[in-house]
Image (cartoon, rainbow, N blue to C red):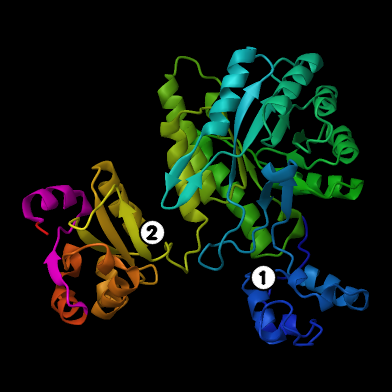
Amino acid sequence: MSEKKKAGLRELSPIDIYKLLPKTNCKECGQDNCMAFATKIVNREVEIDSCKPLLKPENAKAYKALKELLKPAVKEVIVGTGDKACKIGGKLVMYRHEFTYKNPTAIAIDVTDEMPADIVESRIKKTENFSFEYIGYTLKLDMIAVRSTSGDAEKFKAVVKKVADSTKLPMILCSLNNNVMEAGLMAAPKARPLIYAATQENWKDMAELALMYECPLVVSAPNDLNTLVSLAKTVMAYGVTDVVLDPGTFINEGLPDTINNFTMLRRAATKGGEELAGFPLLGVPMVAWANKGDTADDLIKWREAYTASMLVVRYADVLIMHGNDGWMLLPTAVLRQNIYTDPRKPVAVAPGLKVYGTPDENSPVMFTTNFALTYYTVASDIESNKLNAYLIVVETEGSAIDSGVAGRKLTAERVADAIKASGIESKVKHRKIIIPGKASRISGEIEELSGWKVLVGPRDSSEIPKYLIEKWQP
C-alpha cells in the first residue's frame, strides 16, 4: 500500500474537545457546561453543530479544527438523495467493542438491462417490500444495483430510467464502459447513484463522469491492494472526493484472500491511519453466480449468502447480491443488525404495562424484563397463541431474567414497584401474578413487598399457553 499519513490514531479525550470550544457554558446545547458537552462529543452522542456559539464566524477556525479532529477513520459517503439516501462508511474503529459501528452495511439487489421488464419490476418490488420485525427493529434492504450485461448504452439507459421511475431506493450503476455509464447517468441525472467502477484502464473517463454528475465512485482492483489505493489516490487528485474501494470478492478457494484483503484495508485505515485506505468497502457476493454451469441454484444461493455474511462481519460497507429469497437474505440482515448494535448497552424496550388480546378483570397477569430479546420472545408466544393477558415489563437495565436476578437488576423491589406503577390493580379484581420460572428464587420477596400472590410459571415462555390451561384460576 501507499505511505501512511499518520503513525497511528490517538484516542480523543474530552479535554481535546474542550480546548476548542467557546467555553461559554451557555447550555444552548442541552448540557450543563462545555466539559459535559465535550464528553458527549467524544462518545459521539451529540454533534458539534449543537453548540450554537461554535457556529459563529469568529469560531470558524475552531469549528474546522474540531471537524478534522472528529473525522472518522473511514470516510462517510452518501449514495442517493432524499429520505431514502443511504450513508455508507463513517466507521471510527476496527472492532465493535471499541466503539459502536455506525451506518449498517447496505444491501443492494441487482437487475440487468437484459431482464424482461416484468422481472425488473418484480425484483424492485420484492426489494422494497422486504421487511422483518426483529427485537424491535424493522430489517430492510437498501439499494438497487443496475448492471449492464448487454453492453448496449440505450438498453442500459432504458432500465436505469425504469428503476429511477419505479423506486426511490438509491442505485448502483454497474458498467466498465464509460459510454454505457454516461447513458445510465443521463437517465437519472439528479439521482446521485454509486458509479461502479473505475479501473486502471478507464479511471479518467469514470472520474470525469463522477465529477460531472456529482456521484460517488467505486475504484476496483481485484486482489491488488497496492493498485487499489493508487487508484484511490489518482481519482482524488483528479477531484473526486467520495470514493468507495472494491478489493475484489472471490468465493470457494478465493474466499481467504477476500477476507484478508477487506481486513487489511480496514486495519490500515483504523489502526495505521492510512487515509488512502479510509474509504467504504464494497463486496460483491453475487460473484457466486459467475460460471454457474450445472451447479444447482440453491447451492449457489447458499454460497452467496454465507459470503455476504462473512463480508458483513469483515467490514464490508455495501454488498451487491443477486439472490433475493427470504431464506438467504434474512440471516444476513439479522447478523447485520446484531453487528451494528452497541455492544456496551443491552438492547432494551420501554418498561410498562402491555395488553394482549381483550383481557378482562379475570385475565392473567405476568411479568418479564425489558431485555428486548426476552420481551419479544414472550410477546410472540402470547400473541401467536391469541391469549388475553396483561404483561408487565420490568425495568432491568436490559438484563434477561436469569442474569437480572443474579446481577440484582431484577429484584423483588423492582417488580413490586412495576406492579404499582403499571396501574394493573385497577384493571383486575384478583391479586395473582405469574412470574417466570427463572425468577422463582425471589418469589417470596415479591409476595411480601407487593401483597400479590405469586404463581411460579414455566421457565420457557413457549409453555405459557399450557400453563394457563392447567393452572390459571383467578
Residue 299 locus on image (x, y percent): 41, 25
| Location of residue 48 by image quarter | bottom right
Is 460 situated above or below 210?
Answer: below
In the image, 148 versus 202, the foreground residue is 148
Disc number placed over residue 358 in the picture, else none: none
- Up the image or down, 466 lies above or below 70; here it is above
The residue that mark 1 highlights is: 46
In the rendered image, the residue lying farthest to the right is 58
Q: Considering the numbered disc 2 on the image, is that residue within a helix, a strand or a loop?
A: helix
Residue type highlighted by circle 1: Val
The residue that appears at 68% across and 64% down in the rendered structure is 272
Q: What label sits on residue 372 in the rendered view?
A: 2
Query: In the picture, which quadrant includes the C terminus?
Result: bottom left
- Horizontal side of residue 460 vs 137, given as left or right: left
Identify which amino acid the numbered label 2 is placed on: Ala
Name the residue rendered at 34%, 62% in the picture. Answer: 353
Left or right: residue 10 versus residue 308 is: right
Please tell me in which quadrant of the rendered image residue 161 appears: top right
Do labels 1 and 2 touch, CB within 8 Å? Answer: no
The secondary structure type at the circle numbered 1 is: loop
Q: Say if the magenta span includes residue 459.
A: yes
Looking at the picture, how far across and down is residue 222, in whole percent? 67, 37
Q: What residue occupies the far left of the structure in this picture? A: 470
Q: Is residue 256 among what the camera can see?
A: yes
The region drawn magenta spans 450-472
Q: Residues within 10 Å of mark 2 (few under 14, many from 20)?
A: many
Residue visible at 62% across and 19% down in the picture: 120
Number of other residues with Cα within 10 Å of mark 1, as a class: few under 14, some 14 to 19, many 20 or more: some
Question: Looking at the picture, how far across and down is residue 371, in whole percent?
Answer: 36, 63
Separation of residues labelled 1 and 2 (CA atoms):
25 Å
